[in-house]
Image (tube, grey):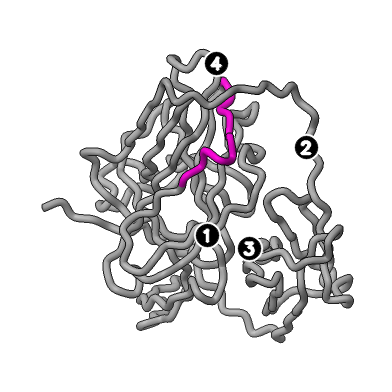
Amino acid sequence: MKQTFIVLLLLCCNFLSAQQNHVVGQVVDAVSLKGLPYVNVVLEEQHKGISTDAQGRFAFVFKGVDSSASLKFSYVGFETRKLKLSDLDSRVVKLQPGVDDLETVYLYNITGENSKKINDFRGKESIGLGNFSGGQFPSMVARYYARPKKFTAACFIEEIEVRFFSTDIKMNRKSKFRLRILNVGEDGKPSGDLLTEDLIIEREDHRAKAKIPLLKYKISIPKEGFFVAVEHLFIEENKYIEKKDYRVYRETDTLHYKDYKVVKYLPVFKGVLEEGGEDFKSFFKDINGWKKMNNLDNSHSVFKGEIPAPAFKIKLTD
């Protein structure tokens, strides 16, 4: 029987004795003034972040920074905004809807005459992909897919299947995540959204996968291909506690922390181990942008010299 592992990306623990502060508020649509659910709110100076709740409300606790530090607010289909902590007195943050550049629009009828199924995890060893910030701020993981050559005219995404990984019952419970379909940038990395709607997917209790129909969005695949990405939401219903033993090495001694509690966020996505190389095009996103998964340290024996990558199942049609 194959063994399965979870990717545990541990951040160094810095224990600060600074005064603790907090800021609360709500993020709204600047036009409709309705609350925006699950907006990413990140304090980049400390590499920490949260997500707003279903009504756009947030409460951010921080320490070790002054009022000149900035919070970054980002949301699909809206312009990203940065605000200094000192400018959050109003407690309401308004985001402007994004304005896409005008491009040539091609109109096609969906015929369903051609189809293509892509399964990237058949016969490969499974691995769990948790939050790539170690529970510090919302992050994403993405995988590239080329446009099949047999689609000479239109090519649409019909369905995406996302699979989940669990080792115990707490990882198998209901949770939410955001699905993103992204363009390919000039640098070959994930870029702007092809799916411009905020698509929140709920994983049901004890479900091993989620099948997401996408034909109604008529996402036309560019000739350069596309990325499928999943994004963690740092909301209360996704939260769980993981206990770990840590060692912090100093010049004079070593500190040991037994059963140290770390807050993590579900779901844990199913991934696979693959060989690296020039054609390896899976990425994760942190505070500093998109990075290839083969930049990760894979020296641990669980990786067997290979690289973790997300495992999606894709259906395309014309």
The residue lying furthest to the left in this view is 1
Q: CA distance from mark 1 to mark 3?
A: 15 Å
Q: CA distance from mark 2 to mark 1?
A: 25 Å
Q: Is residue 307 above or below residue 101?
A: below
Asked if the magenta segment contains residue 37, the reply would be no
Q: What's under tag 4, amino acid-wise? A: Ala
Magenta segment boundaries in residue numbering: 213-223
Dominant secondary structure (helix, strand or loop) of the stretch shown in magenta: loop
> Camera-side residue: 212 or 92?
212
Q: Is residue 62 visible?
A: no
Residue 100 circle label: 2
Disc 3 to disc 2: CB gap under 8 Å: no
Q: What's under tag 2, amino acid-wise? A: Asp
Which one is earlier in the sequence, the residue at label 1 or at label 3?
3
| Residue bearing mark 3 | 47
Crowding at mark 3 (Cα within 10 Å: few <14, some 14-19, many 20+): some
Q: What's under tag 3, amino acid-wise? A: His
Q: Residue 194 location in percent, x, y?
A: 62, 37
